[in-house]
Amino acid sequence: MIYELPDNSGGWHWLVPLLASPVGLAVMVFQIWMLIHALRQREWLWAFFIIIGSGLGAFWYYFTVYRASGSGLSGFELPGAQSRARIRQLQAKIHHLDNAYHHFQLGDVYFQRGKLAVAEKCYRAALEREPNDIDARAHLGQCLLRLKRPAEARPLLDAVCRENYKHDFGHSLMAYAESLMALNETEAAFDIWRHVVENHAYARAKVQFAELCLAKKQPDLARAQLQDVISDDAHAPGFQRRRDRVWVRRAKQLVAQLKA
């Protein structure tokens, strides 16, 4: 439903028919909801379009930004394009070729869509065809970790990181550290996290390392990591802020606790 702001002489009588209509009221509530989300994410240009778009801007923002950033796996990532068309394309290739790489790619698509059980089956299918594939082993480990099965993830991620410490630009190493923490192997996890934050600027690593530092009564080291996360977020592009928002929020909470 499209509506326009009145001129100064019209007062606010335009609100009466709008609020009297269930559809108009729903559009207004939805627009306010999207506007608040955009402002919280510091999407200033999107906020402008939502205000002047009279509902259309809000729906555009919802499908372009909000829904894409609403995954239950916020803060975690794997490479690869995510779409229904991509799934159909890979399934067709698997039907005709049935090779490990296409099973692996399909696993990545399902991982990003949050369908972890299906992703696990795809990664295992890839490993049945290529048992030594390092990418499939690493991503299966990450998948098992998100499925709350760190004991199964640990040996996979351990082997991958021993083979290539820099695999997936440090993401496999972060997952390995997370599996260690889930299994309460905090001493080993501390060393891994320290290595990651010394070589990468990932908010995901810095916040979890800071949490471990706090648990070990090292508040100064924790504070430095958290301040880095908050400072980097202020200058990060929009896509990175959306990806890291869960970690930035946690960093701000921990900083507030340190000040209390």
Image (tube, grey):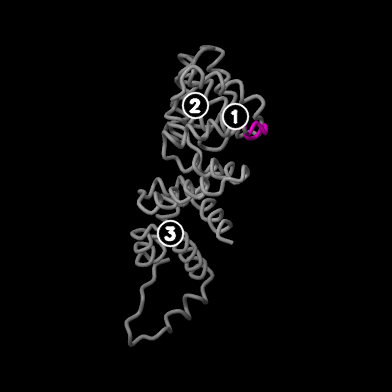
According to the image, label 1 marks what residue? Answer: 188
Dot placed on the residue nearer the N-terminal end, 1 or 2: 2
According to the image, label 2 marks what residue? Answer: 106
CA separation in Å, label 2 and label 3: 32 Å
Label 2 is placed on what type of residue? Answer: Leu
Above or below, 236 against 115 in this view is below
Q: Which residue corresponds to the image point at 46% horizontal and 18% vertical from the top-left?
A: 101
User: Considering depth in this image, is 112 or 96 the residue closer to the camera?
Assistant: 112
According to the image, label 3 marks what residue? Answer: 38
Q: Quadrant of the C terminus?
A: bottom right
CA separation in Å, label 1 and label 3: 39 Å
- Whether residue 2 sits left or right of residue 156 in the image: it is left
- Crowdedness near tag 1: few (<14), some (14–19) or many (≥20) residues, C-alpha within 10 Å: few
Residue extent of the magenta highlight: 179-186
Q: Quadrant of residue 146?
A: top right
Label 3 is placed on what type of residue? Answer: Ala
Q: Main secondary structure of the magenta part?
A: helix
- Mark 1 vs mark 2: give the one in front: 1
Label 1 is placed on what type of residue? Answer: Ala
Instruction: Indicate the position of residue 119 as horizontal and vertical percent values.
Output: 56, 28
Above or below, 231 against 176 in this view is below
Task: Name the secondary structure under disc 1.
Answer: helix
- Mark 2 vs mark 3: give the one in front: 3
Q: Quadrant of the N terminus?
A: bottom left
